[in-house]
Image (tube, helix red, strand yellow):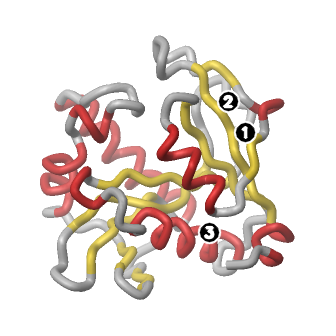
Amino acid sequence: MAGFRHETERLVLRDWREEDWAEFFRHTNTPAVMRWLGGELDEAGMAAQRERVEGSGRRNGFCFWVVERKADGALLGFCGLKRADAPGSTVTGAVEIGWRLREDAWGQGYAKEAATAALGLAFGRFGAEKVVALTVEGNAGSWGLMRRLGMRRREELDYPDERYDPPWRDTIVYSIDRAAWESRDG
């Protein structure tokens, strides 16, 4: 994973630097951003999040990478890939795509641009045959993006994540396979 960097028209997806973490949490550990992600994290939660991301990179060669805006170098959040590993998950071990962008970056197409790049990497560089995405019913912004990426709802794979209470417990699953990705219109 060392030295990972991938550019899109407006963004850079890259490896984490030590100084990125404070900036990431300052902009994304907010009530609005964390509304559908279990709520704001305390110090222990932030440390655990960091370890999950960095551990994924060490184990898999991919993780939820930093999303940086080319125009000004601003850290917008993260987007990338991991292996699904939630306790009780129906998709454990599958390549999972995820994203979290700061609120002032919403509605500008950055999440779709970053996620499109991450899916391309999943099927190209990392050889995935299928990619899943997880959210909760209330997070319409997230599952709306999943649909715009060509992913389809997989209700038969939905599961309760017992680590959380409602509205965060009931996980809904979307997926896309290599053939659907390669045949999409754009």
Q: Are marks 2 and 1 in contact (CB under 8 Å)?
A: yes
- The quarter holding residue 122 reads bottom right
Residue 91 image label: 1
**Local crowd size for mark 1, using a 10 Å CA cut-off: few (<14), some (14–19), many (≥20):** many
Q: Which residue is mark 2?
A: 89
Residue drawn at x 73%, y 72% as measured from the top left? 127
| Amino acid type indicated by mark 3 | Leu
- Depth check, front residue: 1 or 185: 185
| Amino acid type indicated by mark 1 | Val
Q: Which residue is mark 3?
A: 119
x, y percentage for residue 148?
Answer: 62, 60
Taking the view exactly as shown, the residue that stands out farthest to the front is 107
Residue drawn at x 49%, y 66% as measured from the top left? 112
**Local crowd size for mark 3, using a 10 Å CA cut-off: few (<14), some (14–19), many (≥20):** many
Residue drawn at x 35%, y 79% as measured from the top left? 11
Quarter of the figure with the C terminus: bottom right
Front: mark 3 or 2 = 3
